[in-house]
Amino acid sequence: DVKVTQSSRYLVKRTGEKVFLECVQDMDHENMFWYRQDPGLGLRLIYFSYDVKMKEKGDIPEGYSVSREKKERFSLILESASTNQTSMYLCASSPGTSGGRKTQYFGPGTRLLVL
Amino acid sequence: AQKVTQAQTEISVVEKEDVTLDCVYETRDTTYYLFWYKQPPSGELVFLIRRNSFDEQNEISGRYSWNFQKSTSSFNFTITASQVVDSAVYFCALSEYNFNKFYFGSGTKLNVKP
């Protein structure tokens, strides 16, 4: 079974702190994604990566950066956390077009509260 | 631009009722994929089904069925004889041909009462 894990289920940070959210997948997937989920807005793509060291902005990249140094790991960084970044963060991975089941696999999510 | 609309924000039914969740999409691509995911209270999205744009056959899996109609750009999901365990948020999504980007609807929260 594909497994996507996220470093924390719940996180509380203060405004201005630097926050790291880690995501690891164990199925050698090319693509990895970071979304945030807010009530009434569904899932909004922050960044995605289709290869190591490659990244592309999604729909709402402002205030975020990402890092993918290894294929299995995709990190989301909030350089200076703000209260409007309080949200549920979901990581996902997918095999791309080269093979494997053509869908995204999601981690359990991280609920971030910025005070 | 790609867009997925789930007009039903929340639906409540009594157990054993049938319920249909609506999904309408917009895309200019000729090759694309449509998905449904379930998000139970635990939070993790679970894949339910994928359909490619060339396959308009309806699909049935147990109590679940999906109706894909390109003429109306819709991909609706029906649960027959609903159960309390079906209570969740359901998301419809659209992806480009290379699966690099996914576009999600805002979700429909289904409450199934005993």
Image: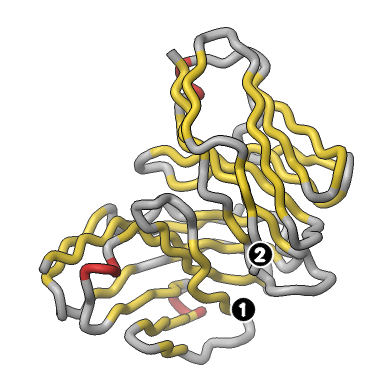
Q: Is residue A69 visible to the viewer in this orientation of the structure?
A: yes
Number of the label disc, if any, that sits on residue A2: 2
Residue positioned 87% across, 38% down in the render? A69
The three-letter code of the residue at mark 1 reads: Ser
Could you tell me which secondary element the residue under label 1 belongs to? loop
Foreground of the two, A110 or B21: A110
Q: How far apart are marks 1 and 2 (CA)?
A: 26 Å
Q: Which amino acid does label 2 sit on?
A: Val
Total marks drawn?
Answer: 2
Image position of A94 with respect to A42: above or below: below
Which x, y percent locates residue A10? 47, 32
Image height of B28 relative to A100, above or below: above
Please tell me which residue is depicted at 58% across the width and 42% down the height of the picture.
Answer: A35
Helix, strand or loop at label 2? It is loop
Residue A94 position in % (x across, y down): 70, 61
Q: Which colour scheme is used?
A: secondary structure
User: Label 1: which residue?
Assistant: B53
* Drawn side of residue B112 relative to residue A20, left or right: left
Q: Where is residue B15 in the image (x, y as percent from the top left)?
A: 14, 74
**Residue A52, quarter of picture:** top right
- The image's mark for residue B43 is none
Which chain is indicated by disc 1?
B
